[in-house]
Amino acid sequence: MIKKTKTILVAEDDRTTRLVMKKVLENEGYHVIEGDRGEKSLFLALEKDIDAFLIDINMPGLSGIEICERIRSIDRYKFTPIICITSMEEEANLEEVFSSGATDFISKPANPIILKARLKAHLQKVRHYTEMEQSRLYVNRYISSKTQRIVEAYSLTGLLPAPEKHKVCIMFTDVRGFTSMSQKTDLEVLFEGLSKNLGMQVDAVYGCGGYIDKFSGDGLMAIFDGDDMVESACRCALSIMDITRRNQASGDSSAFPLGIGIHVGDVLVGNIGSAEHLDYSVIGEVVNMASRLCSYAEAMHIDVSEDIVSQVRGSDLHFDVPKYINMKGFADPVGIYHLNWSDNTYKKQSNE
C-alpha cells in the first residue's frame, strides 16, 4: 500500500513552539509526531517511519546536532529531509549543523510560510530522487549496461560512439512449444507465467556477469564478455536449466521447457538505428550461429558450438559427443555439442 500522508517528527522542547508548528503542518495535511527531548525523538525515529524531521538545535538530553548525526546513520533515513530550527545566536554554528547531516535550517520564530515552503520543496526532492532511483534500478535490470553507457555518452556529447569490434559470448534462450501453449492457455495466465520465467532467466544472467541484449517474445539474447565469458555463459545456461527442472518438479506452471544455444566470437558492437532511437546491440555471424544453435536445441537441452568447447577444455564442464547438422549458409556439416551436468559442475554451481 502506498503511503499518502507524510509523517513529520517535530523535535522541540518548547511546548508552545511545538504546538504552533504542529497546527501549521496538520493544516497542510501532514501527520505530526512530537518529541520533547532528544532521546525520545530518536526513539520515535527508530519506532516510526518518518518522512521529514524538524529538529531544534538546543534540545535537553541529546542535542539537535547529535540527533541529526544518529538519524543519518540509520540507512532508511539516508536522504530524509532534516530541517534544523535555530535561534539567531545559534546560527554561528550552522557549519556544524550541516556537517551533522542537516538538509536545511529555519530561524526562530519559524515563519509558517517559509516552514511550509521549505518542507514541501525538500519532500519533492526526495520523491524525485526516489522515482529516479527506481527507474535506474529498472533500467539496470532490463537494459544492457552498454546501452546505458551509450545513452549517457550521447546525452553529454550529442555524438554517437562509432561501432567497435569485440569478442563476446552470446546465449539465446527460447521456450519450446510456446505457440501451442498460446492456443490452449488464457493469454493473461500465459503472460504472467512468461514474465516470471523471463525474470528468472534475467536474474541468472546478471548473477553470472552477463547482460540482456534483447527479449524475443518467449526468449532472450544475453551477452557475456571478459576473460571468463564462455564459462560464465555455460554456467548461466546450466543454472537456468537446473532452476527450470526444480520448478517443474514442484509443479510451477511458469517452468516452461527451454532450448538454449551458445556461441562465441567477434561481433560489431554499436548503435543500430538512428540517434532518435538508440539500440546499442551486436551484429555478426556469431549472433546468427547462436540463434541457430538455440533453434536446433531440443527441449531442456543446451547446444553449443565447437568454439565454446575448445575454450573451456580443462574445466569441469561436460559435453556430449557432437552431432553434425547441415546448417543453412555453411558448406560443411556443423558440429553441435550438448552441454550437460557433471557431478563436479553441479557441486561447484551449488557452492556458488
Image: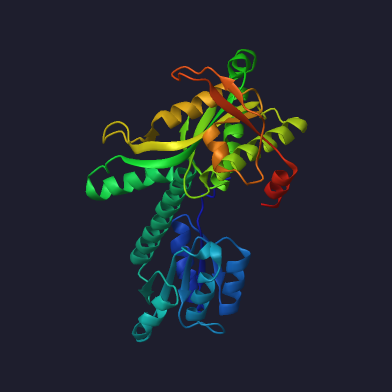
Residue farthest toward the left in the current orientation of the protein: 158
Observer-nearest residue: 284 or 251? 284
Using the image as rendered, state which of residue 332 and residue 93 is in the foreground.
332
Residue at 45 percent of width and 26 percent of height = 288
Q: How many marks?
A: 0
Q: Position of residue 82 (x, y in %)?
A: 45, 68
Q: Position of residue 180 (x, y in %)?
A: 62, 14
Can the viewer see residue 50? yes
Q: Residue at x 43, y 53 (%)?
A: 127
Image coordinates of residue 311 in percent, x first then y, are 54, 42
Q: Could you tell me which residue is drawn at 41 percent across and 28 percent down?
A: 285
Query: Does 178 appear above or below 154?
Result: above
The percent coordinates of residue 271 (x first, y second) are: 32, 36
Q: In the rendered view of the protein, which quadrant contains the N terminus?
A: top right
Q: Is residue 214 left or right of residue 318?
A: left
Q: Is residue 222 left or right of residue 342?
A: left
Residue 317 or 21: which is nearer the viewer?
317
Q: Please indicate whether residue 212 sits to the left or right of residue 316 in the image.
A: left
Position above or below: 73 against 25: below
Residue 216 in sight from this viewpoint: no
Q: How is the image coloured?
A: rainbow
Residue at 64%, 22% (x, y): give it.
Answer: 298
